[in-house]
Structures are given as structure tokens and as C-alpha cells.
Image (cartoon, rainbow, N blue to C red):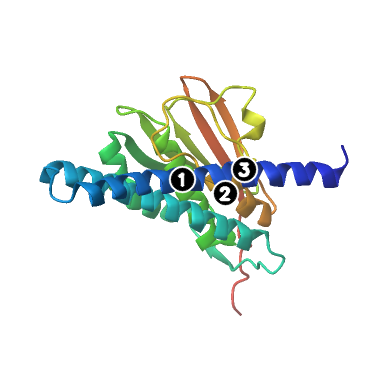
Amino acid sequence: MDHDEHEARLRAELIANVSHDLRMPLVAMRGYLELLARSDDALPSEERRSYVAIALRQCEQLGRLVDELSELARLDSRGVRLARERFAVAELASDVVRKFALAAERCGVDLAAVAGERLPLVDADLGLIERVLDNLIDNALRHTPAGGSVRIAIDREDDGVRVRVRDTGAGIAADELPHVFDRHWRGSAAGARAGGGGLGLAIAQRILALHGGRVEVESELARGSCFSFSLPAAAISAPAR
């Protein structure tokens, strides 16, 4: 199979999988809305509220998938330019942890960031790196059962900073590890919360590729996963004369 045929097959698989992911919430929403429309006032108010809440969650899932498709298309376009700046990854990680604190509490998962000492500033697109952390933490929370933990560790490397997002969740089978960032991949690990993985990992990988890097993953079934990436240290500015 040549390169063009391989790409065509991957596109076909992606379209089929995304179509399935889009269709499922649509079918669910339609079913609950039709039930509510037919029942009029016959359903007890508590049951009606439950059906409306389910339909709203499905609507949110649908919106998320559409947003991810749009974002992935934008990142794939040739006109993407990085807005590089100097910033502290540890501060960004703390901000992202605060953003997910309520979601982690609802899941019963202990979420925290731990930073090493004397970390250099990095040179990267802050907004896009925040998106990478968002996606990796969201993925970790969805695959970590209540009572588990998610840790974001930031450590110094020779030429920059290493960021690790480690969870105590379901883990990933060894034969699936090479495919977790593929856009057409659908994981089979048990224990993930409803909603599916969407395209979050593919988006994270694409963002790091734009920075000249990549996301790496280590995992073991029933023992959790660790997603990690590196960012280059920002050049030290010469002192003013």
C-alpha cells in the first residue's frame, strides 16, 4: 500500500469513527426529546428533569466533538503560526489544575501539580501549551476511578523542562500504545467515563509537533498511564548596557 492509499484509508476510518461519535449523541438527544414531547405533562417532574439533563449532556458532548474537529482542521492548516513567548510552565500548570479542581472533586480524584526547583522559563506558544495540558488532564480524569490520583510533575532537563501527567487509572494495553495519538484510534480500556476520548490526544500531539516535539506515553493496564512532553528553555536575554 503506497502513502496516498494509506492516508486515504486513515481518512476513511477517521470519518467513519467521527460520524459514529456524532451520531450517538444526536440519536440519544432525539430519543429523549421525542419522549418528552409525547409525554407532555404525564411524566413526573423529577423524571422529566432527569431526561432534560441527559439530553443537555449529549448536546455538550456533540458540541465538544464539533469544536475538536474544527480545532484539528485549524492546526493542520499551513497558515498556523506559533505565538511564542517566555513563560513559567509551573505557573501555567497550577492555573490549569485550579481550572480542573471542581471536575476532579466531582470525580473523587486527587489532582495536584508538583514542580522542581530552579526551573527555567520556556519558549513556546502559551495558549497552545495550555490546551495540551487541558487535554491531557481531561483524559487522565476520565480514565481514573474515584479514589485515584492525577499528578502533573514539572522537572528540569538539560535543555529545557519536562512535563509529566501521570494517573492511576485503567491504563492502556501494550498493543494499543502505538496508536493512542492516531485520529482514527478508539481505545478499548475499561473504566473510562462516559463521553469518550474525542480527538483530544491527537490535538495535543499536533500542537507539540508544531513546536518540534512530541507527546510520549507509558502505560500498564490497571496501573495507570503517564503522558509526557518537553519544552525548550527560553534563551537568556543579554543584560542591558
Looking at the rendered structure, the kind of residue marked 3 is Ala
Looking at the rendered structure, the kind of residue marked 1 is Glu
Q: Is residue 34 above or below residue 228?
A: below
Q: How many marks?
A: 3
Residue drawn where x is 37% and y is 49% of the image: 30
Element type where label 1 sits in the image: loop
Is residue 193 found left or right of 174 in the rendered image? left
Label 3 – label 1 distance at C-alpha: 47 Å
- Label drawn at residue 117: 1
Label 2 – label 3 distance at C-alpha: 21 Å
User: Counting residues from the N terminus, which is met first, the one under dot 3 or under dot 1?
Assistant: 3
Looking at the rendered structure, the kind of residue marked 2 is Ala
Tag 2 residue: 204
Residue nearest the viewer, comparing 71 with 114: 71
Proximity of marks 2 and 3: CB atoms separated by less than 8 Å = no
How crowded pointer 1 is (Cα within 10 Å; few <14, some 14-19, many 20+) is rated as few
Q: Is residue 180 above or below residue 87?
A: above
Tell me the mark number nearer the camera, choosing from 2 and 3: 3
Tell me the mark number nearer the camera, choosing from 3 and 1: 3
Tell me the mark number nearer the camera, choosing from 2 and 1: 2
Res. 178 image quadrant: top right
Is residue 44 found left or right of 30 in the rendered image? left
Q: Position of residue 216 (x, y in %)?
A: 62, 37
Tag 3 residue: 16
Residue drawn where x is 67% and y is 52% of the image: 209
Q: Position of residue 137 (x, y in %)?
A: 44, 43
Q: Position of residue 14 (x, y in %)?
A: 64, 44
Residue drawn where x is 20% and y is 46% of the image: 39
